[in-house]
Image (cartoon, rainbow, N blue to C red):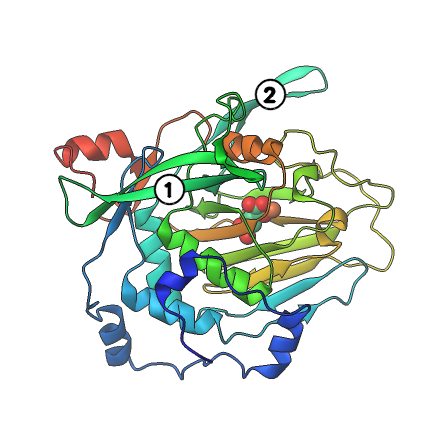
Amino acid sequence: MSKRTLHSFFSPPAKRSKNSLDTLSRRVSPPQVSKEPTSATAIALENAPSDQPINYTAHPGYAFPIADLPPNIAEKVEELLLTASGKAINNQPHLDLLYFEPLIPQPTADQLFRFLRSSLPFYRVKYTITRFGKSVDINTPRFTTVYGLDATSQFISTPTPSPSDPKTTQLTSRIVETTNPTKDVPPTKYKSCTVPPRPIPPCLAMLKNLTEALTNDTYNFVLVNYYSTGQDSISYHSDDERFLGPTPAIASFSLGARRDFLMKHKPPGAGPGNGSKTQPTSTSEPGSAEKVYPGTTQLKLPLGPGDMILMRGETQRNWLHSIPKRSGKNDKGKGRLNITMRKAMVPGGTENYYQYNVGTGPVYRWDEAWSEMRLWEEMKLERGGSSV
Ligand SMILES: O=C(O)CCC(=O)C(=O)O
Ligand SMILES: [Fe+2]
């Protein structure tokens, strides 16, 4: 396979032929899972000097400049994603998964985990819903963040070197109509978003572009969840919002601590999501007596670091998934990152994603010394105002 440069991953990948993923799975050799490295090799890899200094990307929508993926991690991830093959799981009604176990083996998965956890701004979103006529306050039980824009609009970003820091590139973006890129979107188009939409930073754009090449699909949103302990979770839901279309492909990466990913078929008679702006869209109440859909059983995938699961076809319309709480798992500092790539078709998707994954609250950032997510405002004061 001819080697693509990292820069080529910032432009859309060349389309593979129809069904090329399955063809690819058969055609290419399995991922090169190296033998367990000796600890000396692992340490050498972890500390491999990158031949370039780490650069940062600043944007008015980023709480602080976000580091670009270090070249030693980027090159490894590129190589792994371009040679991977997954296992199809489609032995139950309406279930269509492709499981890469793992897609990114150690030690790269761990390097990527630690890099992304410390490089991204996170939020702990609170919102209010109405349930049975009553207002209910919801505290999202995990850290979240999101980047991207639905298919009706596009960012046109201009990079300029930062005058105060040679390592930082400053991005300024316009949002234009996809159908007419000379036309800026009207200011009212995204006025219901809790924050102005922000472009996917290079470290996640690279992962997204490689995932597009691997899955022969395109994505315009990257959502990130951080489960700091076993008490962080996501309840049973399906990502079946109308703004994702009827058969969405969602690529979901796991990094860090292993957590169970549970899936069950929606009960008989349960319709697809109604597209309402609640998160998650379709839920099942814990403990509610539900009929099991005939011929199906619950699936439990203990997702580990570097695993990737592609949910596609009829899956979201018919199946629910969750990361349940677990006691004694992921003690302080372990944590699990989940990164999903999705494609929203209309502005309602942009609104929904920023509302439920950024919200209006404060920014958190991983503090390596404290081994926990902390309020960025407090960390900034301690750093004397320095952002990176
Ligand atoms: O953390 C995971 O693996 C699942 C996350 C998820 O289902 C979601 O963000 O919609
Ligand atoms: Fe989900």
Mark number displayed over residue 87 = none
Queried on whether the Cβ of the residue with tag 2 lies below 8 angstroms from ligand 1, the answer reads: no
Residue at figure coordinates x 33%, y 56% from the top left? 114
Q: Distance between the residues labelled 2 and 1?
A: 39 Å
Residue at figure coordinates x 55%, y 40% from the top left? 178
Residue 128 placement (x, y as % from top left):
57, 21
Q: How many residues crowd mark 1 within 10 Å: few (<14), some (14–19), many (20+)?
A: some
Residue 65 placement (x, y as % from top left):
27, 42
Q: At label 1, which amino acid type do we have?
A: Ser
Residue 102 placement (x, y as % from top left):
50, 70
Q: How many residues crowd mark 2 within 10 Å: few (<14), some (14–19), many (20+)?
A: few
Q: Is residue 334 visible?
A: no
Quick one: 372 or 325, which is closer to the camera?
372
Residue 184 placement (x, y as % from top left):
47, 30
- Residue 22: quarter of image: bottom right
* 51 to the left or right of 24: left
Q: Name the residue under label 1.
A: 157
* 278 to the left or right of 34: right
* 171 to the left or right of 296: left
Q: In the rendered view, tell whether residue 297 sits above or below residue 188.
A: below
Mark number displayed over residue 136 = 2
Q: At label 2, which amino acid type do we have?
A: Val
Instruction: Tell me the quarter of the image containing the C terminus.
Output: top left
Residue at figure coordinates x 42%, y 61% from the top left? 9
Quick one: 295 or 290, which is closer to the camera?
295
- Residue 71: quarter of image: bottom left
